[in-house]
Image: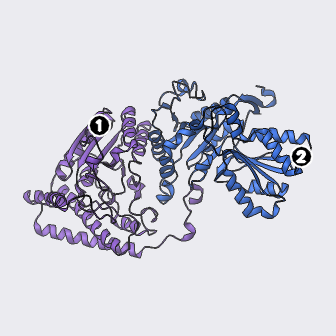
Chain colours: A blue, B purple
Amino acid sequence: MDNSTGKITLTYREALKQGLRKALQNDENVFLMGEDVGRYGGAFAVSKGLLQEFGADRIMDVPLSEAGFVGAGIGAAMAGMKPIIEVMTVNFSLLAMDQIVNNAATLLHMSGGQIYVPMIIRMGCGIGRQLAAQHSHSWEPFYAHIPGLIVLSAGTHEDARGMLRAALQSPDPVLLFEYTLMLNLEKEIAADLGFIDITKAKVLREGSAISIITYGTGVYKSLEAAAELALVGIEAEVIDLRVLRPLDERTFLESVAKTHRVLIVEDAWRSVSISSEISARIMEKAFYDLDAPVQRLCGVEVPIPYPAHLEEASIPQKNDIVNAVKKMIRHD
Amino acid sequence: MVQSTTEPQPMDAKRGLLFLYQMLLIRRFEEKAAEQYTKAKIRGFLHLYIGEEAVAVGVIQALREDDNLLCTYREHGHALARGIDPDIIMAEMYGKMQGCCRGRGGSMHLFDVANRFYGGNAIVSGHLPLAVGMALAAKKQKKTNLTCCFFGEGAAAEGTFHESLNLAALWEVPVLFVCENNLYAMGTAIKYSHAITELEKKGAAYGIEAVAVDGMDLMAVIAAANIAAAKVRSSGKPYLLVCNTYRFRAHSMFDAELYRDKKEVEEWKKRDPIPQFEQFLLQKQWITDAEITAFESKIEKKIAIAVDFAEAGTWEPLDQLTKFVYSETGN
């Protein structure tokens, strides 16, 4: 850490923890509930020490009852609290899907604007830790399909630290995807993040040759790929979508108007995915800006296998991005 | 207006007449709703509560204005017993803008936050976790209100029932769970749904005090509900009240009732809670036959007004279709 430059170096885990801690400090109505968030310190050690700091009323260990405690979080939000619900991994969120879809996402509209659900669900997710098919899901497209939810993806350390606090200002239910593969990854970020906007995508690297649109673990991979491409004279623009619902179209449509080429990168399965949606919107709204068809790098449509070489081959890697861009630009 | 007061009051003529009025209002309101359904004024699903009125009236009288109430998709009776205006309930069933949810919810989704009436929940047992969470919030906020949650015996076979009872007991939060056991989960009799059909026994697994009561007997429901509510308030812990009851009408308007014997229905009708309670009031000389007749005509007028209100209601403009999907667009 170096205060003199206004920058700090921290892991993704530490960034998440700082965001969580600030949220708890700022508002008495905020509490964290989830499996093993307290005494265990969080399955990924994100909430380690928070029980000692904030007490058992605000850091609540819950039984293995995803539908029960997610629903209870929704109920607590309906009654004036601001719960942060940790679903240990996105894989288990399917057990709570009825609560998320039929209650959290639905109540405000169905009640004619009477019932607000200001709740956040944090979920560890991502592929790449050899956890095999049942623990390697990319459910961002599932949840981004549902009107009434705000779906955020923390693909950077800035967002790992800042998105949670911003989300607490939302009167609507927010799902926050956190990427466990990055937990130990260190990055340098601004010590004071200031206001974090959770309505916009972000151009993380400017470029003129192509727009790489991505989110989640695709963000750093795409930035690395862009750096490598720059060495051979290809300037790629990298956009982190950040907000998967409601989508910020303007940011990526403006980029398309500039670069005229698009590669979309995501871990989720290709069919009916975030990239399907982005691609469709570009076709609908920016077709005449394109010099070439939109291309996609997505997860291979397979239950994610355990062995490292197969797992790695299941999702887009940096080299895949580099090669795909070269092919699009140079036709090689 | 919520009809209940802070503490349960002893039965007297005034309260007796109020409860009879509420049960009759529910019965006649739903008969009218069924009629309007056959005229296609009301669409979608319509689940009638006829036969079960003593449960909603008997339990809800034990609640305070600041208590939360969550119900199932068979909730017209509860909404009326809670004091929600029949006009806005009927308008909601018509799908009109003047309904309690702007017509968006319909029969199965009545919400009225002013009366702390949180549905109208149509995924069986999906609202039980919400009830636990609302009670948890009250505990955290150091409030003294309880959360009352109605559900059917079908819900007691769902995982969320068990999760919710466990959480409520574990967290020691004030939820009054009220199981309305009408013996059929749609068309599946309880003996085909539950290994243990005495549902009150399920409370013991979670250390939750539980009792079963004859849900066709208003006086019995009132007595049991008063005890239950008092225990939840004094202990801050959950309680399970099982009201054994029966629906006289089909599950919904689409149900041909192939799964039960007409004789069985007729047997249960002999235990209709409304004539039973009328007899009680007559014996006490708190009411006369002439007054009951006058009551009926008063209710008939009230329902006619509700129908007129719904008929005169307007449709939500199409440009408001997506209003309130998110709060930003709803201001």
Q: Viewer-nearest of labels 2 and 1?
A: 2
Q: Nearer the viewer, residue B280 or A214?
A: A214
Question: Where residue B81 sits: x, y (%)?
Answer: 29, 57
Question: Where residue B177 sits: x, y (%)?
Answer: 32, 44
The residue where tag 2 is placed is: A234
Is A21 on the left-hand or right-hand side of A182?
Answer: left
Residue drawn at point x = 70 percent, y = 41 percent: A315
Which amino acid, mark 2? Ile
Q: Nearer the viewer, residue B168 or A56?
A: B168
Q: Nearer the viewer, residue B2 or B89?
A: B89
Question: Where residue B164 sits: x, y (%)?
Answer: 39, 40
Is A233 on the left-hand or right-hand side of B227?
Answer: right
Element class at badge 1:
helix
Question: Where residue A200 sits: x, y (%)?
Answer: 70, 50
Which amino acid, mark 1? Gly
The residue where tag 1 is placed is: B203
Element class at badge 2:
loop
Is residue B245 visible in the rendered image? The answer is yes
Q: Residues within 10 Å of mark 1 (few under 14, many from 20)?
A: many
Q: Nearer the viewer, residue A301 or A293?
A: A301
